[in-house]
Amino acid sequence: MTKHLAVFEKNQYFGLNFFSKAFINLLFYYFVRLSMKKLLLFLVCCYATSAVYAQKLELGGTVSLLTKENFEAYSKPLFTSMGQSFNSNLWTTAVHEDRFKIGLDFSFMAMLIPESQKNYTAALPSHFSNPQIARTAYNKNGVETVQPSTVEQPTFYGSTPTTVYSIPQDQNGNYTYQSIGGNAEFPSGNGLNAVLGIPAVQIMMDLPSRTHVRLRVVPVPSIDDDMNVFYGMISVGHQFNQYIDPLKDSTLGISLNAAYSLFSITNVIDANALAIGINASKKLNEYFTVFGGIQYEDFSGTFTYVRKDVTPNEASSNTPYDEVRENLYTNNGVLNIDPRNGTYMVNNKDNRKPVVADISTFSNIRIVAGGEVHLKALQLHAQVAYLSQFMFSGGFSVWFN
């Protein structure tokens, strides 16, 4: 299973049990089988020791010890990359023919990860700033901080995490490792400066009235016990300078564009992307066209998972976050502690409430500049886009009539 899909994190190997079958099929739909490791980064579930049971995604390792708030911050740059991919290559030239024609477009992209998206500010348990409950501290770059309320940690694209150490201050047994937990541990990132986007294969149509439509539909049915993957997109552009006499020029095009995407994985991801913009192009000669535009876009939804089993009483299982402790070790409001030795007893996975994290993006405004080469029925295109993650993309289109 993991011979197909694997990621390395600081020399630690972890498999992608859930997505192995699903995204091999997805890639075949896209006719792409290269850079699989980086491609799968966009599909979120390459966290340590992930698995699936009863149509639920289970995340393990230190990722499972993140609160919902910290998980959203940790994964936001990753979802930003995904959203940018979905909202890319929606248009090139703004000159559309006043007749029906159909073709295919194949596009590829890459993004640069800014330093600002390699770290986030993690919230710590409220008692970490109270020395009467626990003595807490962390050391970062040789500087020690005591009784912190927050700490900077790596995102999915970052590198090395910082452990915040905690020693409960026992006051007649009120504050113990069993009652308030111990150290706060965080997942490491993958140390990436750039990633590949999700390739796009789309049907293109020019319609009478100089309207341009693009469609992407990728269903992958019956994946791992009836879990389905679906990705669909529709984009519509209309050349409106045809209505303005001073701008009526067969080599000039100005279009309004709108696009909407849906991406879902049963019981795991339910997300959508929206893009609205304007673009213009100028045909310089028979072979070359330049184009540019500006676009507002968004990407939102939910990502649902269940925290994976953590071996009781190992260092990382003694989490100080009430939210995580209650989810992993509490059953019907009662903390599962073995009466024989006072150690934690992991809650049955069926009793753990799923974590429903919000999906959001850093990127809302896209400014694009690019060019297109015309070789009869074949067209080559390339562009750069300014967003929160600077983007390069290119590809080719083939028209059939």
Image (spheres, rainbow, N blue to C red):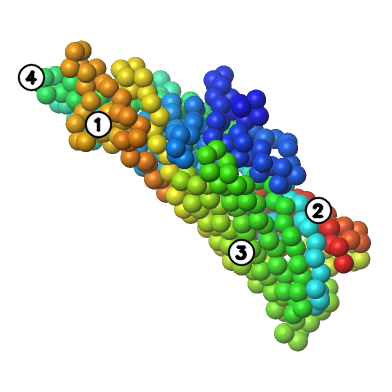
- Of the numbered discs 4 and 2, the one sitting upstream in the chain is 4
Residue 395's x, y, as percent? 78, 51
Query: Which residue is painted at 65% across and 52% down in the image?
Result: 218
Q: In this view, does 385 lie to the left or right of 249?
A: left
Q: Distance between the residues labelled 3 and 2?
A: 20 Å
- Of the numbered discs 1 and 3, the one sitting upstream in the chain is 3
Which dot, 4 or 1, sits closer to the camera? 1
Q: Name the residue under label 3.
A: 259
Which dot, 1 or 3, sits closer to the camera? 1
Quadrant location of residue 8? top right
Asked which secondary structure carries label 1, the reply is: strand
Residue kind at label 1, given as amino acid type: Thr
Disc 4 vs disc 3: Cβ atoms closer than 8 Å? no
Residue kind at label 3, given as amino acid type: Ala
Other residues around mark 4 within 10 Å, as few (<14) / some (14–19) / many (≥20) = few
Residue 223 or 244: which is nearer the viewer? 223
Disc 2 vs disc 1: Cβ atoms closer than 8 Å? no
Q: Is residue 362 left or right of residue 282?
A: left
Q: In this view, does 283 lie to the left or right of 292?
A: right
Above-or-below relation of 315 to 4: above
Q: Name the residue under label 1.
A: 330
Q: Distance between the residues labelled 4 and 3?
A: 62 Å
Q: Mark 4 points at which residue?
A: 172
Asked which secondary structure carries label 3, the reply is: strand
Above-or-below relation of 346 to 233: above
Q: Distance between the residues labelled 4 and 2?
A: 72 Å
Q: Mark 2 points at which residue?
A: 396
Other residues around mark 1 within 10 Å, as few (<14) / some (14–19) / many (≥20) = many
Q: How far apart are marks 2 and 1 (CA)?
A: 55 Å
- Of the numbered discs 2 and 1, the one sitting upstream in the chain is 1
Q: Distance between the residues labelled 4 and 1?
A: 24 Å
Residue 345's x, y, as percent? 27, 22
